[in-house]
Amino acid sequence: MDKVVHDDDFIQVGNEKFIPMISAEQIDERVKQLGEQISGDYVGKLPIFIGVLNGSFMFMSDLLKEITIHCEMDFMKLSSYGDEKISSGNVKILKELNADISERNVIIVEDIVDSGLSINYINKLLSEYNPASIKFVSFLVKPNSIKYNVKIDYIGFEISDQFVIGYGLDYAQKYRNLKSIYKLSE
């Protein structure tokens, strides 16, 4: 197993170096802002937040703590990456929803939108269940990488096309537990 060398300035993963990109403090502040915005947009409604596992779990947990209206939650799990840095281009459902979303206001919670493949797939899939609405909130968005006609309604941070880890985002299922976001050093 690779030993992770951690320093305030970088994280060494094998031969690759990751440097700080978004601090835990910046994340906390932005998540609070998103929670306020979403709460305001859904006053008088009972939205259901659906987290896309595994990556969204930290963001969704923190986001729901900032939601000031009644809400429900569920999870679904998709795979389009496996252990790779680049998506395979194929989406598979690994865990389906448990909740009935018919006539519900659905808010999909994603960790990162890269090509838009997953949210395009989710939108088409969940639209078949006749929800009242479907909106997307993503912690990170790579606008220059999006290849599908998708709309992300709430965005934490826009980033360039870089490989990142931390705060739920992984490298071969590791490093999700980092409190900040680190990017692969050039």
Image: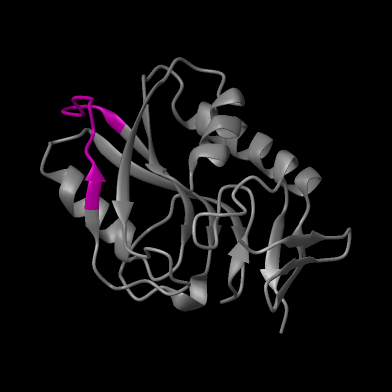
Depth check: 165 or 154 in front?
165
Q: Is residue 146 magenta?
A: no
Magenta residue span = 93-105
Would you identify the image quadrant in which residue 77 lies? top left
Image quadrant holding the C terminus, namely bottom right
Main SS, magenta region, reads loop
x then y, percent, for residue 140 = 56, 57
User: Quadrant location of residue 103?
Assistant: top left
Q: Residue at x 41, y 73 (%)?
A: 146
Residue 128 vs 6, above or below: the answer is above
Compare residues 52 and 158 and report the one nearer the observer. 52
Asked whether, in this view, residue 127 is left or right of residue 23, the answer is left
Q: Residue at x 19, y 43 (%)?
A: 126
- Reply above or below: 45 against 77: above
Residue 123: x percent and y percent? Answer: 24, 51
Q: Residue furthest right?
A: 8
Tell me the quarter of the image containing the N terminus: bottom right
